[in-house]
Image (cartoon, rainbow, N blue to C red):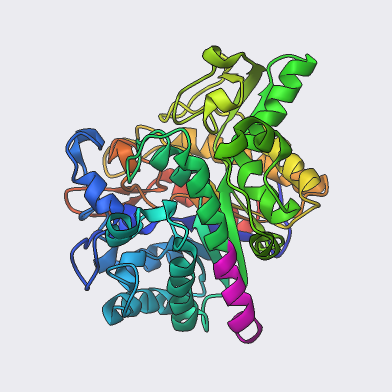
């Protein structure tokens, strides 16, 4: 039996645009994802999040699902445009009521809410009026939005995440253009990341000054990172793997834990990498109470000269020509339906890298999971591949804890099948199968497996 520490947090995760639907209900304003998904050719099969899992109308049913499997925690995101339809101004009481009801329902079933304040769905008005995250006034606007959330929900919410995966916002949204708002640039990702880090620090600052003492919660940020293993033992490849990790995770974590961007980024990106003011640095340094990590896969990294760089938007960890890194996989590695390699040991290596570089922070895996071509057969979904994936990755997590890593929790992505961004409904990450015609939720075998794991605090 592989057992976990007594106070280990077991949860699942979702995001507002991926599950809520009700895109024009409850006083909600439009978001950049509403606009992007309605742009022909942007999403596989022309899918949208207009209805998706219809979670907006199914709170009680969905929380009952969680309670039925003994879930201890649930990570969800707040749609900014439900709270502030135009991104700023007067709050929308219906939006506040919706999330308040969800939080109350969770607490009634002894499920701890973990709330993400921004999971990619920027109010469209802020994109149109201010150029979104390119605008240096956005941090204050974000701070004011988060203060409304702290004020409205902080009496009951004790776990806050400011941003989910700013790398994705920066690279896929403003670099490669495959995610909303769909911009393509070699310089904008660095500007966007800079404003997001400033916005994160402003939100943390207002929380710590005005709310934390009386609400007694914690606040952090979630970054995504895949492991980069040197392709060979050569010094060049070892440096390439390190460089790839610094461009991927160090880009966002170094300013928070070490006070500035990695030196290798300053050197290679030069004038395209913005500089923090002294005030920014003071606010950003130490602005996370825990280290939120989303982890899915591993790749080999080798030194490469410019033109040979990997330009796959989903894999390169940044603007590849700035890094001189070529990424590859082992043909023997199994892959999920996303084409991501299953390399459990990469998770443990990454946990050690974070522990060493950032001075032993408490780490929470805020997402880990896999997509498979799940089929409903005679009312059941046999997803043994998912169970194998989860048990392999969790085995490495347990080993990391034994080796001294302060890993405090694990959130499985995802509670249910949902809108997988540019891939629409063509990928299923859930441990509950969602019939998109009827909205019916059907537990997969992995849901029962995860339920048993939580009950036994191990497997």
**Left or right, residue 90 beside residue 152:** left
Vertical order, 400 against 98 (above or below): above
Instruction: Give the side of residue 315 with respect to residue 65, left or right.
Output: right
Residue furthest bottom as drawn: 214
Residue 185's x, y, as percent?
A: 41, 34
Q: Give the range drawn in magenta.
A: 201-216
Q: In which quarter of the image is residue 43?
A: top left
Q: Which of 205 and 292 is in front in this view?
A: 205
Determine if residue 369 is in view: no
* In this picture, residue 45 sits left or right of residue 330: left
Question: 114 or 271: which is nearer to us?
Answer: 271
Secondary structure predominantly adopted by residues drawn in magenta: helix
- For the point 63% across and 54% down, the residue is 276
Residue 141 among magenta residues: no
Q: Position of residue 296 (x, y in %)?
A: 54, 37
The image quadrant that residue 397 belongs to is top right
Q: Where is residue 164 in the image (x, y as percent from the top left)?
A: 50, 53
Identify which residue, 346 or 206, lies in the foreground: 206
The residue shown at (62%, 49%) is 275
- Extreme residue in the front direction: 271
Image coordinates of residue 179 in percent, x first then y, are: 35, 41
The residue positioned 82% from the left and 44% from the top of the image is: 403
């Amino acid at each position: 039996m592989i057992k976990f520490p007594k106070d280990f947090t077991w949860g699942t995760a979702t995001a507002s645009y991926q599950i809520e639907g009700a895109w024009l209900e409850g006083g909600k304003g439009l978001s950049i994802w509403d606009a992007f998904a309605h742009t022909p050719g942007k999403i596989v099969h022309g899918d949208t999040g207009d209805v998706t899992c219809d979670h907006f109308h199914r709170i009680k049913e969905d929380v009952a699902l969680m309670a039925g499997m003994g879930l201890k925690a649930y990570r969800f995101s707040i749609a900014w445009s439900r709270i502030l339809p135009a991104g700023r101004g007067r709050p929308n009481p219906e939006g506040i009521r919706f999330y308040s009801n969800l939080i109350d329902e969770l607490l009634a079933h002894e499920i701890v809410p973990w709330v993400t304040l921004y999971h990619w769905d920027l109010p469209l008005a802020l994109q149109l009026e201010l150029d979104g995250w390119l605008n240096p006034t956005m941090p204050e606007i974000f701070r004011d939005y988060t203060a409304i959330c702290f004020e409205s929900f902080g009496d009951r919410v004790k776990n806050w995440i400011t941003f989910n995966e700013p790398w994705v916002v920066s690279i896929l949204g403003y670099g490669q253009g495959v995610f909303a708002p769909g911009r393509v640039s070699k310089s904008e990702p660095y500007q966007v990341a800079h404003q997001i880090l400033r916005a994160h620090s402003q939100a943390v600052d207002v929380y710590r000054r005005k709310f934390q003492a009386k609400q007694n919660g914690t606040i952090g940020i979630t970054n995504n990172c895949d492991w980069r293993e040197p392709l060979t033992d050569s010094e060049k490849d070892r440096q390439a793997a390190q460089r790839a990790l610094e461009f991927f995770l160090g880009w966002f974590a170094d300013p928070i834990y070490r006070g500035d961007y990695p030196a290798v980024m300053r050197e290679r990106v030069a004038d395209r990498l913005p500089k923090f003011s002294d005030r920014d640095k003071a606010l950003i340094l130490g602005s996370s109470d825990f280290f939120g990590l989303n982890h899915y896969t591993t790749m080999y990294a080798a030194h490469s000269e410019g033109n040979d760089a990997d330009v796959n938007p989903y894999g390169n960890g940044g603007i590849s020509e700035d890094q001189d890194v070529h990424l590859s996989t082992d043909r023997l590695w199994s892959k999920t339906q996303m084409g991501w390699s299953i390399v459990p040991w990469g998770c443990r290596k990454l946990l050690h890298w974070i522990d060493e570089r950032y001075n032993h922070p408490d780490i929470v895996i805020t997402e880990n999971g896999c997509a498979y071509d799940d089929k409903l057969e005679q009312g059941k979904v046999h997803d043994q591949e998912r169970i194998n994936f989860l048990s392999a990755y969790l085995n490495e997590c347990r080993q990391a804890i034994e080796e001294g890593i302060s890993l405090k929790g694990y959130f499985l992505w995802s509670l249910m099948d949902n809108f997988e961004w540019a891939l629409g409904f063509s990928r299923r990450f859930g441990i509950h199968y969602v019939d998109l015609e009827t909205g019916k939720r059907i537990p997969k075998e992995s849901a029962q497996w995860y339920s048993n794991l939580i009950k036994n605090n191990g497997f």
